Amino acid sequence: MQTRSLRTLVKVAQVGSFVGAAEQLGMTLSALSMQMKALEAELGVALFDRSVRPSRLTPVGRSVVAEAEGVLGREERLLEICRPGDDLVGSFKLGFVSTAAVRLLPGFLQAARGGRATFALETGLSAVIQEKVLTGQLDAGVVTNADGLPEGLSARLLRREPFVFAVHRDVADDMERQTFFHFMPGTGIGKLIAGAMGSPRDVVVLDNLEAIMECVCAGLGYTLMPVPDVERYLTDDVVMLPGPEGLQRRLELVVRKGSALARREKALARLFGVLAAENAAP
Amino acid sequence: MQTRSLRTLVKVAQVGSFVGAAEQLGMTLSALSMQMKALEAELGVALFDRSVRPSRLTPVGRSVVAEAEGVLGREERLLEICRPGDDLVGSFKLGFVSTAAVRLLPGFLQAARGGRATFALETGLSAVIQEKVLTGQLDAGVVTNADGLPEGLSARLLRREPFVFAVHRDVADDMERQTFFHFMPGTGIGKLIAGAMGSPRDVVVLDNLEAIMECVCAGLGYTLMPVPDVERYLTDDVVMLPGPEGLQRRLELVVRKGSALARREKALARLFGVLAAENAAP
DNA sequence: AACGGTTACGAGAAACGTAAGCATT
DNA sequence: AATGCTTACGTTTCTCGTAACCGTT
């Protein structure tokens, strides 16, 4: 079925005659007549009562017109999402590195509201997300850039987050004697931490930022992690001390080179509050 | 836009490849490829990422597929109302003679429930309704057959309703001495009443059955009207007496000869509780 | 090399406009 | 006689299948 016939039918119903509708649609009366004839044949019902001039809709015809308007409405919605524009359009599969998802998602989804894009989200390790972006299982990923970027992916910097030490103020003086809470060394930020810390005396490994901060708040030791995460769980009993010089976490938006999203990736980055100007490499 | 392309697109999305979809749709890979290419051109967006084999949907492609399913769903609904069947299908404009509407409508609408037909209803005088059916403003009418049927209309008997006198029991003995409440003589049943009654002593004309019965119940006089209407407003104080021999109201379903409904008029009559057998002429 | 998709090309189908014909008003 | 729609017919445009071709895996 072609929606053009339905549009014609609806127009005929509005105008009340074939001639009038043909004029308004810029087509011949003959063409319109044949179109309606073909539609009737396709549907297997008589849409018009042709025993009168101008011919009138039959009862079924009226019902069909009502349904046709529904079909055309949905078609309009379909065309709407194809209308060109600067905004992001489509249904995207995004991966977030777990340690960033908690903080970034609310703002991201807020920014995405009202837009013409929808999202399917999953969280995981940076390495896994990168792999899925590479194979096309994900359209884009937000990851911690620790090692270099795999060939075939391109990245855009979303955030730089300096690392700081967090420690209970009672034991801040001899921090090095305390237990060090180490976020999983295999992960993105874990690798950065491991590279900067050498070998602390006493180490506990944990895979949960919130749990680590709970322990630090309880005065059980100290940790090293990105500022925003520390701030997130900061209490009056905890102080921040400068981390290793230059140590920072780079949160990057990665997409597959040459993918459909690669060209509209700037629009996606904008949903993270990143402006066009901020995309210079370090 | 042709819905066939949308169906193809959805199938490709389900199956995951052009080849598989082409097989299931019984068409050539070439044809399917060209169809998708044409669809992309029409929509002005890239639905597929062709840099991989098998090619994958783009984010916009996924959104378009979702919308396409909506369009196809509405198309299915449209086709549904065209599917042949014994039941009545369409959107009908019906006219009811006012004096019958009150009693018939509830049962009619009840019977119509769940069917594939919808109705726009209006009430009025039999003559007006017949005229509108004749000119096509109405698809069918339920009227009181008083005079003959206009040429061009065909009728089917729905009900025979004998006339009875209704009178307050206190004055039933000398009924003829009382005021006669006469339903409007210009109308269908009014003509029947006028023809049967001659010239009663004291006459009050009213256009409202319920009001007439209220007056009768109040002992203000007597009236002559169809049994069901009397029964509708009957109280313990009122008695029914046999009306003039053979006087009855015939409620008929009228449609225009040769109209689309003319062939399915039996199905419509069924909604009034009239069985196929009961259509013999008197 | 196998698989998946595209392109070129010719055959058949479909849609349109012109113009003549027919029915309703 | 005028209006409104249909039909016949030639032209143009679409759509498809065959088959050769190209890129990915």
Image: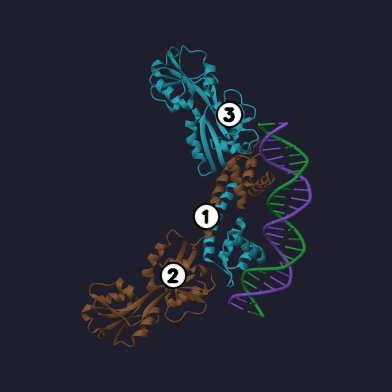
Chain colours: A cyan, B brown, C purple, D green
Q: Which residue is mark 2?
A: B277
| Quarter that holds the C terminus of chain A | top right
Q: What amino acid is at disc 1?
A: Arg
Q: What amino acid is at disc 2?
A: Ala
In front of the other: label 1 or label 3?
Answer: 1
Q: Are marks 3 and 2 in contact (CB under 8 Å)?
A: no
Residue A84, can we see it?
Answer: no
In front of the other: label 1 or label 2?
Answer: 2
Q: Find residue A39 and report its horizontal and vertical position in percent.
A: 61, 60
Q: Find residue D12 and report its horizontal and vertical position in percent.
A: 75, 58
Q: Say what secondary structure mark 3 lies in.
A: helix
Is the same chain shared between marks 1 and 2? yes
Q: Which residue is mark 3?
A: A130
Residue A264, compared with residue B142, is above or below; it is: above
Outermost front residue: B277
Q: Find residue A107 and report its horizontal and vertical position in percent.
A: 49, 36
Name the residue: 40% across, 23% down. A214
| Tag 2 subunit | B
Disc 1 to disc 2, how far (Cα)? 34 Å
Outermost left residue: B170
| Tag 3 subunit | A
Q: Which residue is mark 1?
A: B77
The part of the image, by quadrant, that contains residue C22 is bottom right
Left/right placement of residue A22 relative to residue C19 reads left
Left/right placement of residue B234 relative to residue A198 reads left
Disc 3 to disc 2, how far (Cα)? 76 Å
Taking depth in this image into account, of A40 and A163 the one nearest to the observer is: A40
Disc 1 to disc 3, how far (Cα)? 44 Å
Q: What amino acid is at disc 3?
A: Gln
Left/right placement of residue B12 relative to residue B227 reads right
The part of the image, by quadrant, that contains residue A170 is top left
Q: Earlier in the sequence, mark 1 or mark 2?
A: 1
